[in-house]
Amino acid sequence: MKTSRRFQLLDIFYIIMMILPLAIGMVIQILTKPLSEGITLTGARIFFTIPMPLQDFYITESQINSLLVTVTILFFCLYMVHGLNERVQLKRQHFAELIVQSVDKLVVENMGEYFKGYAPFIIAMLALSAFSSLSSLIGLFPPTSDINVVGGWAILVFILITYYKMKCGPLYYLKSFTEPIALLAPINFLSEFATPISMSFRHYGNILSGTVISTLLAVGLSGLSSMILGWLPGVLGNISWLRVGIPAVLSIYFDVFSGCLQAFIFAMLTMMNVSGAFPMDEYFERKQKKQAKKQLA
């Protein structure tokens, strides 16, 4: 397919805008991260604080990186849909259609036809989670290593779960706490809040543990290299030979595979919990009764 110069320039602009936010994040990381010796494992740094009446609002490293990742995803999507046509003429269109079809199929298989419109929400959650975790590959603090970020996603899912549970009315929702017997009401009430807590800690804990293990392995390999190969003359003895290549191979699991896997698990739990919370049969039965009453009236 022959493209105009304007089309090509717009493509270049989208590609630059995909890379620019991550480059800005790397520059911020270099300019603001304090020098340290040895192992340093800390949470997201606080850049500045906005005074508020009840609680100060902290602008942290994870929030900034989340925004940068979101902008990158936005321009990636704009690049993918640029030039879409009924007649497939661009290779990227094949890839874009494959993503849409795969996510639509995933949502329908796990949530049902009623929730087909949730596909954009699920793919957005997958992309944001995966790209946030993978940002550690370029030296950024991964937002998924911050419990506040992942906890916010889990709260959003919890709101959706509660919304669908109340589709049949508040009384039906309250009655569900007494099933199968009323004595289990306190346990059912606690389990209601256990869902977002378990989702957030599972995702956050796995990403953070991968970061910690990767850091410890890198430092351990440095010490082992110095102990085994420190006898080499001159500069050769100061080089951490065992850190060449081995951490990169380990990063394939801890950063790439684990990050993508946790994004998929979080999306799957979202689909299962939201669709499972919806009493579909009861909802449509009540809806039919209401329609029958309107027709009789």
Image: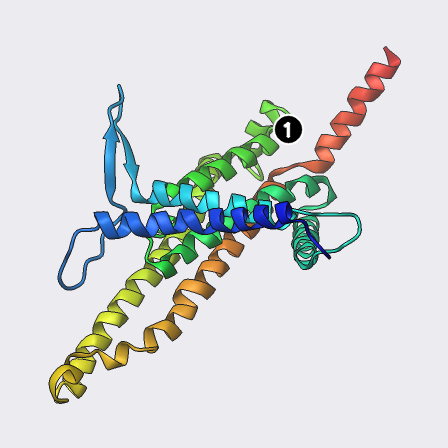
Q: Of all residues shown, which one is farthest toward the front? A: 5
Residue at horizontal 47%, vertical 43%?
71
Q: Position of residue 128 (x, y in %)?
A: 49, 48
Which residue, given by chain and number where applicable, does mark 1 sit on?
Answer: 167
Work out whether residue 184 or residue 61 is closer to the camera in this orientation and state it.
61
Q: Is residue 123 visible?
A: no
Crowding at label 1, few (<14), some or many (≥20) Cα neighbours within 10 Å? some
| Horizontal side of residue 86 vs 195, given as left or right | right
| Horizontal side of residue 4 vs 245, given as left or right | right
Residue at horizontal 24%, vertical 31%?
49
| Amino acid, disc 1 | Lys
Q: Position of residue 73 (x, y in %)?
A: 51, 47
Q: Where, quadrant-wise, is the N terminus in this rendering?
A: bottom right
Q: Quadrant of residue 215?
A: bottom left
Q: Where, quadrant-wise, is the C terminus in this rendering?
A: top right
User: Count of labels shown?
Assistant: 1
| Horizontal side of residue 37 vs 292, given as left or right | left
Work out whether residue 154 or residue 27 is closer to the camera in this orientation and state it.
27
Q: Of all residues shown, which one is farthest toward the top? A: 297
Q: Is residue 226 visible?
A: yes
Q: How is the image coloured?
A: rainbow
Work out whether residue 214 or residue 274 is closer to the camera in this orientation and state it.
214
Q: Of all residues shown, which one is farthest toward the right? A: 296
SS for tag 1?
loop
Residue at horizontal 22%, vertical 47%?
32
Q: Relative to 120, is 237 above or below? A: below
| Horizontal side of residue 216 vs 163, given as left or right | left
Work out whether residue 51 or residue 53 is closer to the camera in this orientation and state it.
51
